Image (tube, rainbow, N blue to C red):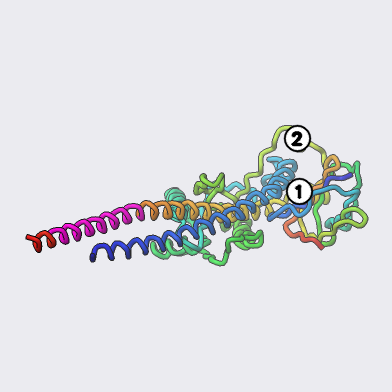
């Protein structure tokens, strides 16, 4: 019963794989839950910052803040691509890389030089493969990105932007709208687009400002940029875990389907062999009696 | 009573009420009681105190906003002291 043994081996192998994918699914689910909590926890800060900036900001201030400078004709921009360090997350990284590539092509088509900064091993692997030089690369960002990580990524870019060496900074990341909706997204973090004023509410109150509205803005605009990057980091981690969970759930389901087919084939082969043996015995007995 | 929240990029560290807030502004301490005029001030580095013997936090940078007895402390670096 050579075929039977072979089938048994495959069944065992698929069962083991399913155990692994099921475990990974559960791990990803719990990591996603925590990452999702961090996305939610980051909202009040962003909200508070936007509120105050929008109530202090007026368009005529734009020229006085280098971070708000609107370049007439951008010559060189930076693109920061956030990817994960680990794979087995379905098309997660591929989608992010595709989005980044589309942006790069579009910008270069307009004659803009693009510095590519990559976070995450998966993005690095791709650009190494296509042989494109990267401005910076990072793989030390963990599943728990901190505000300090974000600051480190964007600090130099802000300096370059203020000095006029860069005319724009884009971040490509995975937006976390919901567990099932994490589209790859490109946000322009520099020049800063000041949050728009919401009508009524706190926007139009006369605040006492210390030391002055301008001083406060010049302090808060960099915070706003850092926070945009921090949120991108956090949302990307959540998106990664969501993508991994979906991928592993599919793998587990597929393994189950495969097992059904294999088991059926195995049982059929076993049954056929038994039937054949009985037929042989009956046949043999009949021959002896005859 | 003032409604106070202390917000860092990663999380809301404190949310609740206090009779008073003493915060390290960029140029010295600032004290806030109920009925304070709307204000936004930059923060320096130091200790933030809620009430007379309540919670204390170490903060550095960021700003403090007062509006209608709601105090928001928004800072990149804050931790309970």
Q: Which residue is mark 1?
A: A214
Q: Work out which quarter of the rendered image holds the N terminus of chain A and state it.
A: bottom left
Pick out the residue farthest to the top.
Answer: A200
* Residue A248 pos. (x, y %): 46, 55
| Residue A270 falls inside the magenta stretch | yes
Q: Nearer the viewer, mark 1 or mark 2?
A: 2
Highlighted range, magenta: A259-283
| Viewer-proximal residue among A160 and B67 | B67
- Residue B38 visible in the picture: yes
Count of picture labels: 2
Q: In the image, what residue occupies the spot 54% across and 65% down?
A: A138
| Viewer-proximal residue among A21 and A49 | A21
Quick one: SS at disc 2? loop
Q: In the image, what residue occupies the spot 67% across and 46% down?
A: A63
Q: In the image, what residue occupies the spot 22% across and 59% down?
A: A273
Q: Which residue is mark 2?
A: A201
> Which is nearer the N-term, disc 1 or disc 2?
2
Using the image, name the chain to which the residue with label 2 belongs. A
- Residue A97 visible in the picture: no
Is B45 left, or right, of A61 in this rendering? right
Q: Residues within 10 Å of mark 2 (few under 14, many from 20)?
A: few
Q: Which mark is residue B37?
A: none
Q: CA distance from mark 1 to mark 2?
A: 22 Å
Residue A128 vs B35, above or below: the answer is below
Q: Work out which quarter of the rendered image holds the C terminus of chain A and state it.
A: bottom left
Dominant secondary structure, magenta: helix
* Residue A225 pos. (x, y %): 64, 53
Q: Residues within 10 Å of mark 1 (few under 14, many from 20)?
A: some
Are marks 1 and 2 in one subunit?
Answer: yes
Using the image, name the chain to which the residue with label 1 belongs. A
* Residue A122 pos. (x, y %): 46, 62
């Amino acid at each position: 019963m050579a075929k039977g043994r072979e089938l048994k081996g495959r069944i065992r192998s698929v069962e083991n794989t399913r155990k692994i994918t099921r475990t990974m699914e559960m791990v990803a689910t719990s990591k996603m839950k925590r990452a999702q909590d961090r996305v939610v926890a980051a909202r009040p800060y962003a909200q508070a910052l936007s509120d105050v900036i929008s109530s202090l900001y007026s368009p005529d201030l734009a020229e006085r803040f280098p971070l708000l400078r609107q370049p007439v004709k951008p010559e060189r921009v930076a693109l920061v691509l956030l990817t994960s360090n680990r794979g087995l997350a379905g098309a997660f990284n591929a989608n992010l890389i595709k989005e980044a590539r589309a942006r790069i092509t579009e910008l270069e088509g307009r004659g803009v030089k693009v510095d590519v900064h990559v976070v995450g091993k998966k993005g690095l692997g791709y650009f190494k493969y296509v042989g494109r030089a990267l401005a910076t690369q990072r793989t030390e960002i963990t599943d728990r990105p901190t505000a300090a990580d974000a600051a480190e990524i964007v600090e130099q870019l802000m300096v370059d932007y203020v000095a006029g060496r860069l005319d724009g900074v884009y971040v490509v990341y995975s937006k976390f709208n919901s567990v099932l909706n994490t589209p790859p997204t490109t946000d322009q973090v520099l020049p800063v687009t000041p949050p728009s004023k919401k009508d009524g509410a706190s926007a139009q109150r006369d605040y006492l400002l210390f030391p002055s509205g301008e001083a406060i803005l010049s302090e808060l605009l960099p915070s706003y940029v850092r926070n945009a990057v921090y949120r991108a980091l956090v949302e990307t981690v959540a998106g990664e875990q969501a993508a991994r969970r979906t991928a592993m759930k599919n793998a587990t389901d597929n393994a189950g389907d495969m097992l059904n087919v294999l088991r059926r084939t195995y049982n059929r082969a076993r049954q056929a062999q038994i039937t054949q043996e009985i037929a042989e015995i009956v046949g043999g007995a009949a021959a002896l009696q005859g | 009573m003032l409604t106070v929240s202390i917000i860092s990029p990663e999380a809301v560290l404190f949310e609740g009420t206090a009779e008073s807030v003493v915060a390290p502004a960029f140029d010295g301490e600032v004290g806030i009681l109920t009925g304070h005029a709307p204000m936004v001030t930059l923060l320096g580095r130091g200790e933030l105190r809620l009430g007379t013997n309540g919670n204390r936090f170490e903060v550095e940078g960021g700003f403090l906003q007062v509006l209608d007895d709601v105090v928001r402390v928004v800072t990149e670096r804050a931790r309970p002291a």
